[in-house]
Image: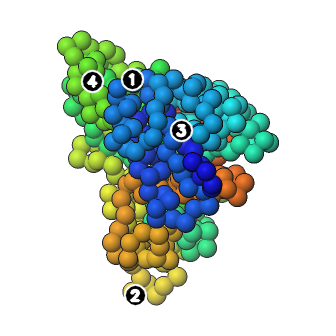
Amino acid sequence: MTGATLGVGMVGYAFMGAAHSQAWRTAGRFFDLPLQPDMAVLCGRNADATAAAAQRMGWRHTETDWKALLGRDDVQLVDVCTPGDTHAEIAIAALEAGKHVLCEKPLANTVDEAKAMVAAAEAAKAKGVLSMVGFNYRRVPAVALARQLVEQGRIGEIRHVRAVYLQDWIVDPEFPLVWRLQKDKAGSGALGDIGAHIVDMAQFVTGDRLTGVSALTETFVKERPLPEASSGLSASGSSERGEVTVDDTALFIGRFGGGAVASFEATRFATGRKNAIRLEINGSAGSLAFDFESMNELSFYDGTEDPGTAGFRRIYVTESTHPYVGAWWPPGHGLGYEHSFTHEVVDLVRDLAAGNDPTPSFADGLQVQQVLDAVVRSAESGSSWEPIAGED
Ligand code: SOE
């Protein structure tokens, strides 16, 4: 392809790969972009499965070795959608090969890996090669609107941050030991997989950072059937069993640099809760509340109103003036999960074309990793107070 295109090579094609494929496919069709994404190459280890996924999701070519992807002239950006144990190796090599990188969250499985990724990102930036970590929920219009309201001072000085991420997809003890339940592949359990999202969201919306935490983690089901086959979040198990090496739930309290106190809870055992990402922020002049299960809504309490008629009001975040919404449907028609990934890609492409540093950066991803690390240290020591490296 010629002209203003951005050749994309994606590694991985399961749940996140499908979500990112949808984003690359729709971004330039709904948003005016300075570069048109070209879904050039899909990479996966199994040739037949990769070819089938490429055909289904609209990728033009396939590779079975990610190193071959890095040598291709039709790829200018590598999108890393693999389990966490391969993020660092692929992302660093891609940056060194002069490819921009979008890497799924959490950035890495350890702080050391994340630091190496930041070093590679800094070196690449000096040569105009940019990177972003994929915390997609920042780009849900209601969450982006919450950020705008905080920035405008509409809730005043922030006192409380309350964040939970509740799922229930492994509540059945016979659900197999998929990679997300293996520490060597995923780094941690609910903590890194979904706790990382609420740490990023809370810090993004408040514009502030956690300085310290005290935590508790638990693994309710210690052994599970080994998986025979798995795809995304579904799997079938064999008769053999293996040890669960990650947390099923992580709870922690924390302090923000600006003085707010916070509580966080990430669990995959909240029976009946499918993807309930809830964030409530109370400030000196008002409050905001969001729940992903009603993702087109934001609740806002304006404490400056007459107390006689003040109350939480539901903002239906579907106006063309709301963040990202104008590119989609007429007011009132609403968006879904996948749009957050499209918005991520839109912002990334615009930043690449303008030579701006995309956010969240790998350095932001490292900071979240340092929060996760502090949570683990605290939980292991029996809920000690742990400062966040670099923030104390
Ligand atoms: C599984 O818990 C998962 O797919 C996460 O890995 C994603 O990041 C989250 O958005 C949805 O749930």
Front one among 240 and 205:
240
Give me the C-alpha separation between circle 1 and circle 3: 16 Å
Lower position in the chain sequence, tag 1 or tag 4: 1
Q: Which residue is mark 1?
A: 46
Q: Position of residue 178 (x, y in %)?
A: 33, 26
In the picture, the quarter occupied by the C terminus is top right
Task: Please tell me which residue lies in front, 209 or 33.
Answer: 33
In the visual, does 367 lie left or right of 274?
Answer: right
SS type, badge 3: strand
Q: Which of the two labelled residues, at mark 1 and mark 2, occupies the earlier sequence position?
A: 1
Amino acid at circle 1: Asn
Pointer 3: what residue?
9
Q: Which residue is mark 2?
A: 308
User: Quick one: label 3, few (<14), some, or many (20+) residues within 10 Å?
Assistant: many
Q: CA distance from mark 3 to mark 2?
A: 57 Å
Work out how far the residue at label 1 is from the one at label 2, CA to CA, in angstroms. 64 Å
Residue 360 seen in the figure: no
**Which amino acid type is marked by label 4?**
Ala
Position of residue 244 relative to residue 80, above or below, is: above
Identify the mark at residue 229; answer none if there is no mark: 4
Lower position in the chain sequence, tag 3 or tag 2:
3
Residue at horizontal 32 percent and vertical 57 percent from the top:
293
